[in-house]
Amino acid sequence: MNQPPSVPEHVDAVVVGAGFSGLYMLYRLRQLGLSAKVIEAADDVGGTWYWNRYPGARCDIPTTDYTFSFDPELEKEWTWSEKYATQPEILDYLRFVADRHGLRSDIEFSTAVTAARWDEQDKRWELSTSGGARISCRFYIMATGCLSMPKQPDIEGADRFAGPVYFTSRWPHEGVDFTGQRVAVIGTGSSGIQSIPLIARQASALTVFQRTPNFSIPARNGPAPADRLERIAQDRDAYRHDARWSRGGVPIEPTDVLGGTASPEVRRERFEAAWEQGELFGILNVFADQGVNPATNELVAEMIREKIRSTVTDPATAEALCPKDHYFGTKRPCLDTGYFETYNLPHVRLVDLRRQPIVSITEDGIETADESFAFDAIVYATGFDAMTGALVAVDVTGRDGTSLEAKWAGRPSTYLGLMTTGFPNFFMLTGPGSPSVLSNMAVSIEQHVDWVAGCLKDLRDQGLETIEPTAVAEAGWNQHVQDCAAITLHPTANSWYMGANVPGKPRFFLPYIGGVDAYRQACDDVAAQGYLGFRLAGPGGERCQDGVIRSMQPDVAMVLEFMASLGLPPMESLSAEDARAFMAAAAETRPPGPAVGEITDGVIPLPAADLPYRLYRPAGPAEEPRPLVVYFHGGGWVLGNLDSDDPLCRDLCARTGAVVVSVNYRHAPEDRFPAAAEDAFAAVQWAGANAIELGGIPGQLAVAGWSAGANVAAVACQLARDAGGPAISGQLLICPVVDSDMTRPSYTENGDGYILTTPLMRWFWDYYADPADRTDPRLAPLRGNLDGLPSAAIVTADFDPLRDDGLAYARALTEAGVPVRLIRARGHTHTSVTMVDVVISSAPVRAEMAAALSAFFPATEPVT
Ligand code: NAP
């Protein structure tokens, strides 16, 4: 082996990999006038398209879109021959790009980077290569692709087979002739599904070993779609722009059709259209909610299963090929050409490993629990150590001597999928935490390369040498990536997106599912905010504006965007009547909330007024007594009624198994302070006195409320204590109003844009109470005596003007010796925590509320 030379070669940047991303990165580095070198393990350009030469290998994004857009001339000179081009054609394209821009002269082929070490003294990376060279560079850029590190065979006896063994991911360049051979294929992901029909054409006998059946739709390959070519011809720039600002990197109109509400005819029509079209983003866009709603997902899944059953003639084989253990789309769906039809051939057999698992690979074949098979060749289509495998394969050592592998042992952690703390000037193109594999890679690659190039230019222009994310920014981004995934069905699947295909790999959702458009915006925002969350340093100075770029729950942001798009007048510009009418109309269109055992309406007869109430009884024997919760709706003492918080009451009832009595107290301006407070206390007294009749357990009475409802609930607790009863077991205060002081920071920080605004709060106060009354503890319970109050659970939302009210009350109660459970609705607004079945991310918050309510009644078990 060569000894490393004592003097390393110096360049500004080293790029590892000469596929799509490495080639474009080199092009941009040269444009910036930086010296750059690309290190490539293969003997040619191409990356994934160099290695994956198995028969039938094609892209699964139409090639009109899976193409570089940075050079319009390039687009004029290259015409794709098919809708989905083959691997040789895509490889030719990348060679053409490399030659056209003279990129090869800066690429060192047949060389791998083996180690990279950050030198804190020199602020440079020092790399070692397989050829024994040392290279010193300021910027180290991994362009190694997401699916480039083949997963090692994890099957007993894999090294025992005497015949030839092939990996789809490392296919021999000269090709393989299976004519007359008995061939085994292990794996039915995209690579297996693409290659099986072609291997079947040659093999005398083909046996496919399937562990998990996969969803696949016909690619319907052929000429590039005419409508798309026409759109590109008409206005290429507009088309590429639309792609960049689309969800997946291919311009399509996201549907707003929901599976549950569409008629059977519409469902069928939409599905068949997508099936006929043969495109990934089409079949993932049959219904707006198929990625988040299990019932809708099942509609699509079952229609695909019907297609499989109608294609495969042997019913048992058809059933074995029907995916049933994961939601459609949560594993990468495949596009095929004649895949299911292949199983109708007499020499092709499917072995369902769920029924007869592989015991061992043997010298001459494969032994399953039931049978021994003899083969001439085995093909592994068993996938990759995706997204992180190639990155940690190099021995990368960061600032404090920690290796990337060690840092990521628990889980991969990045800021924007681009960089990682502790590794200055180390960039990953399409790294974990970026849209990458969930998008059209060509678009995502260009976006990353452009961002990195812009960043390097900014550093140079500002006399800065190093850039590194902060721990705060990185943790915030990791959280956001997981938050985006958590509202989808994706985390339920054992997919390579989750790292679940590699034994021992931490289970985390690796790519960013918030969309190419949202992601691009986040990256642009980071740069526009002076590289928010990055620490930058150099002769030009040192600076760091620390922070988190996205801390709102993604579905909350979507609701806010939707609300903003409606262009509604501010609520406080309406009359109380009009505001009530608006609320009622909005309530008509939302999901009803979960089913409960029984709902009955009644009236509480009080001297001042009869108060309507609605009682929610949980499922189960009607005669079985339950704890009782008296609930007060939100609406600023002005708005709201029994309908307004109906889904939330159902949710609380279903989750806790308590009887919930929602009380419609009197409202302002018709009945001003202290009407609402007095009603609330009177309703609690009435509920306590009538607990048995209401189906409650005497002595197990809690109060709950949201917003102004939480205000009157808190006041009722104080009044009950002063009156010596009724005994209240606990108070659940959801985003409560507890004080008339509107100078706390959250009134400024969150005063506008989150539905409940500071001006709207003023409007509520003015309707409800004269300024002179606003320090009365029956209005501002924070100013009251807090001794001896019942245990409290207080929910505060990050983006709520009332956030600091809730925090202040929690603090004050704690100081007064009252047990308090603080529930932080992370990334939520005042209203989003109550949006049952609309804001999916609020469900865990309500689960916590329910747990807190249940804990007020120690004898009962929470309903799960
Ligand atoms: P994959 O999707 O991970 O599929 C691997 C297959 O091997 C799965 O069926 C897996 O079963 C099976 N497998 C793995 N280990 C096994 C074992 N020990 N015993 C039995 N079966 C085993 O890998 P891939 O097909 O190479 O595709 C990976 C990704 O590359 C695709 O999802 C896609 O993003 C990309 N790709 C795209 C195209 C294209 O059309 N452009 C083509 C190829 C690949 P389990 O599911 O049970 O783990």
Image (spheres, helix red, strand yellow):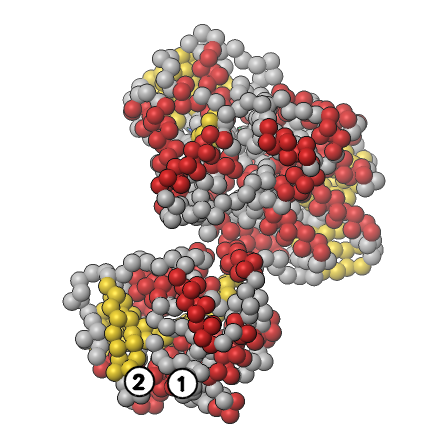
Query: Residue at coordinates 68% horizontally, 58% vertically from top-left?
Result: 532
Q: Quadrant of residue 170?
A: top right
Q: Is residue 346 visible?
A: yes
From the viewer's perspective, tell me whether residue 170 is left or right of residue 40: left
Q: Residue at x 75, y 60 (%)?
A: 543
Which percent across, then down, holds residue 758? 56, 75
- Where is residue 1? Give x, y as percent: 70, 25
User: Please, is residue 793 above or below residue 607 in the view?
Assistant: above
Q: Amino acid at mark 1?
A: Asp
Q: What amino acid type should be assigned to the residue bearing mark 2?
A: Ala
Relative to residue 700, is residue 554 depicted above or below? above
Q: Quadrant of residue 447?
A: top right
| Pointer 1 residue Cβ closer than 8 Å to ligand 1 | no
Q: Is residue 698 left or right of residue 539?
A: left
Residue to which mark 2 is pinned: 609
Q: Is residue 207 visible?
A: no
376, 635: nearer the viewer = 635
Of the numbered discs in the image, which one, if any, rests on residue 369? none
Element at label 2: loop
Q: Are marks 1 and 2 in contact (CB under 8 Å)?
A: yes
Quadrant in the rendering for residue 596: bottom left
User: Which of the two residues, 511 or 645, is positioned nearer the viewer here?
Assistant: 645
Q: Which residue is mark 1?
A: 671
Taking the spot 17% from the left edge, 62% from the top edge, the residue there is: 621
Compare residues 426 and 30 and report the one nearer the observer.
30
